[in-house]
């Protein structure tokens, strides 16, 4: 049965036209899947689904996501991450030999307005889809927050308090759409993307207006499973408050780049 799959040109180039066409025809794509972004069930026979290809030095993992969560794309990861994913295969028979693996974590980003000291501030909430280990670490664990604190993010105990400015970082907005979070380049080089949208993300008129007024964006980050994809800003605020109360939230204020 044909699937409602999105296969980007980049993914097609990696897996080949023959495999891409088999996926679209439903020969090799699963009907049901767990979204690699939000980890909730999806069905490629009933809703638009993105193919996401994780590529290491020697191995590839083909995963699936709700099209509303992630666009079809190729994600470059380390071979160690992919080998761990391959060892976690549970079901499925894949031509690449790796489908149905536990995919490496990627960063999910949600935009919203956060009320602080009587003023609405544009905010981004960053939450990975899985634990983030320190490079070279073995034995699992989640070092996402310690790694960010080392980069200058500050622990948040009260969301009502403005976080300090993270100098050298910025949030890139272009043509009214969110493109990336930039961090300083190495050895004083040009800024590089810490997170880059697979395709430009729409933000609300209110979010864009607040960003242009204040010329900065608050970036909150929490470990996997802390915030989730909240459908309303009041629910997102409640989740941020809970994360702060349990010591699972860091934040920084970043200058706005673009308009």
Image: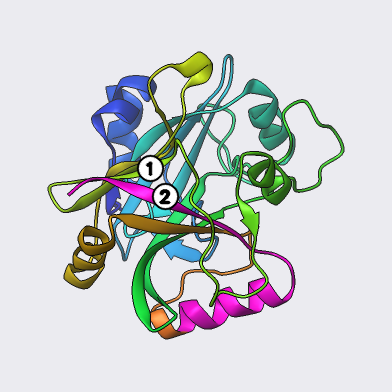
Q: Which residue is mark 2?
A: 254
Span colored in magenta: 235-259
Examine the structure image and report whether residue 213 is included in the region drawn in magenta: no
In the rendered image, residue 106, in percent from the top left (x then y), is placed at: 53, 44
Examine the structure image and report whether residue 248 is included in the region drawn in magenta: yes
* Residue 101 seen in the figure: yes
N-terminal of the pair, mark 2 or mark 1, is: 1
Q: Examine the rendered structure and indicate whether residue 223 appears above or below residue 160.
A: above
Residue at image location 57% in from the left, 53% down from the top: 129
Query: As drawn, which residue projects farthest toward the left?
Result: 175
Residue at image location 44% in from the left, 63% down from the top: 42
Q: Is residue 164 left or right of residue 73?
A: right
Q: SS class of the residue under badge 2?
A: strand
Q: Which residue is mark 1?
A: 170
Q: Nearer the viewer, residue 196 or 11?
A: 196
Residue 81, image quadrant:
top right
Asked whether the beta carbons under mark 2 and mark 1 sit within 8 Å of each other, the answer is yes
**In the image, which disc is placed on residue 252?**
none
Residue 124, image quadrant:
bottom left
Label 2 crowd bin: few (<14), some (14–19), many (20+), radius 10 Å: many
Real-space Cα distance between discs 2 and 1?
5 Å
Residue at image location 51% in from the left, 51% down from the top: 36
């Amino acid at each position: 049965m044909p699937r409602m799959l999105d296969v980007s040109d980049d993914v097609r180039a990696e897996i080949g036209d023959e495999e891409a066409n088999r996926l679209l025809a439903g020969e090799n794509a699963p009907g049901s899947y767990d979204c690699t972004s939000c980890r909730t069930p999806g069905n490629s026979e009933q809703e638009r689904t993105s193919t996401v290809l994780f590529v290491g030095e020697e191995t590839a993992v083909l995963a699936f996501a709700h099209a509303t969560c992630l666009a079809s794309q190729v994600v470059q990861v380390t071979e160690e991450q992919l080998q761990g994913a391959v060892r976690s295969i549970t079901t499925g028979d894949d031509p690449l030999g790796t489908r149905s693996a536990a995919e490496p974590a990627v960063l999910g980003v949600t935009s919203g307005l956060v009320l602080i000291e009587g003023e609405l501030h544009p905010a981004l909430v960053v939450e990975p889809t899985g634990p983030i280990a320190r490079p070279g670490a073995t034995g699992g664990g989640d070092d996402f927050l310690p790694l960010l604190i080392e980069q200058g993010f500050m622990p948040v105990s009260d969301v009502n308090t403005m976080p300090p400015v993270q100098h050298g970082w910025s949030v890139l907005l272009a043509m009214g759409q969110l493109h990336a979070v930039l961090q300083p380049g190495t050895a004083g080089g040009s800024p590089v993307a810490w997170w880059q949208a697979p395709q430009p993300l729409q933000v609300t008129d209110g979010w864009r207006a607040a960003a242009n007024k204040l010329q900065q964006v608050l970036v909150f980050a929490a470990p996997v499973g802390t915030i989730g994809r909240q459908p309303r800003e009041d629910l997102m605020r409640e989740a941020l408050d809970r994360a702060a109360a349990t010591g699972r939230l860091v934040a920084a204020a970043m200058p706005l780049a673009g308009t």
